[in-house]
Amino acid sequence: MARRIVLDTDMGSDVDDALCLALALASPEIELVAVTHVTQDTHFRARISRRLLEMAGRGDVPVYAGRGAPFDGTDSRFVWFGNEGKGIIDDTGDELVEEEDAVDALLRLLAAEPGLEVVAVGPMTNLAAALDRKPEIASSIGMLTIMGGHIREIAYAGKVLPPGVDYNLCSDAAASLRVLRCGAPTRLVTGDVTLKTWMTNRDLQRIEAAAGELRGALAAAVREWTPIMYRLFGGGDPDQPDANVAFLHDPLALASVFDESFCRFEDLEIEPVMVDGVFRTLERERATPDTFTMRCAVDVDASRFRDFFVDRVVSL
C-alpha cells in the first residue's frame, strides 16, 4: 500500500524541491495527498508546484499557500534568490492555488486521517503554526520526515561548513524548536548526509535526452540554479561532465519515506536547542528530559541513490 503524504516545501529557490516533487510523482510507493508551501511569497511557490503537477498530469493534487514570515514574527531570514519559477512558469501564467490556507489544510487533513505522514523539506513554519493552534495534532502524524538538522560534521568541497548552513531548520529557529519538541515520530535526513549526494552534468543530460515537458522544465530549473549553488558553496568547474549541478537534499528525504536502505539510519537521542544563537540538533549519548528519540540518517550510498533518482525521473 502506498504511503500517503503531505509535502511541505519552500518550492522554487533551491531546485531540489522541484526534483523532490518529481520523485514523489514518479514513485508508486507514494500517494501525494497535498502540497503545502512556506516562506516569503508562498502563493507564487504554490503556482510553481501547480504547474509541475499539471505537466505530470496530476492537476488533481491540491496546492496550498502557507506562512511567509517566521513563526515568532522576527525579521525574516528566508531566502529569495531570483531564480524562483524560471524554466517552469512565467509571469503570464494563471496556475490555480487553493483558497484554503496551508495551516488550515494541515489541521484538517491530519484530523481527518490520523496516521497521515508529513514530509517537510523547507522551514518548519507551517507545522509550528499548526501545532501552536492544536498541539494534539502531533499524535495524528504517522511519521514526520524532515530534511534538515546537523548531527555530525558537515563537509563539502574540502571545507567544513558551519552549523548555520542547515537552512531549513536554522532560518526559523523558533518554529524548529516547536516542531522538533512536539513528540511526533520523527525521521531526520540531515545536511551532513545530504551534502554527499548530488546530480551531475551527465545525469542532467540524460534527463534532457529523455524529453517531455516536465523533464525539460526540471532541467531548465537546474540550469538556473547551478550558478547560484556554486556562489554559495564553491567547488570545482561546474561545466565538467561529473560536476555537481544540484544537491539531492529533498529527494533523499522523500525516498527515505519508502526506502531507508539508501541511507544508514540510527535511532538517536536528539536535543533540539539553541547554541550561540544557532538552532542545533545535538546528539546525546543517553536520553534526558530535553532529548527526543529520532530516526536519523548518518550516512548515504550516494551513487546508488543518484542512479535511482535519475532512473525514476527519466521514467516519468
Image (cartoon, rainbow, N blue to C red):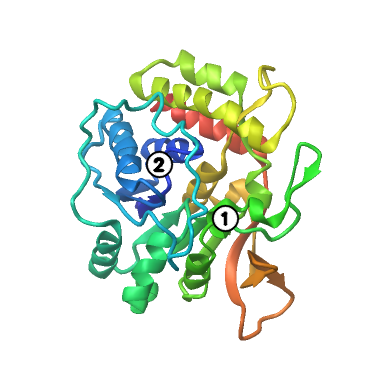
| Above/below status of 98 relative to 285 | above
**Percent from the top left, x then y, of residue 247?**
59, 37
Q: Could you say which is closer to the camera, residue 27 or residue 43? A: 43
Question: Residue at the location (43% across, 27% down)?
Answer: 218
Q: Which residue is mark 2?
A: 24
Q: Residue 164, percent across and down?
A: 65, 55
**Looking at the image, which residue sits at the far bottom?**
289
- Which residue appears at 29% of the width and 66% of the height? 110
Q: Position of residue 298 (x, y in %)?
A: 68, 56
The answer to whether residue 269 of the structure is visible from this angle is: no
- Look at the numbered disc 1 and give the secondary structure of its residue: loop
- Indicate the amino acid at tag 2: Ala
The residue under label 1 is which amino acid type? Gly
Tell me the number on the disc at residue 100.
Answer: none
Q: Which residue is tagged 1?
A: 148
- Quick check: marks 1 and 2 in contact, CB under 8 Å? no
Q: Is residue 244 left or right of residue 22?
A: right
Q: Residue at x 47, y 41 (%)?
A: 80
Residue 224 shown left or right of residue 88 in the figure = right
How far is mark 1 from mark 2, CA to CA?
A: 18 Å
Q: Quadrant of the C terminus?
A: top left
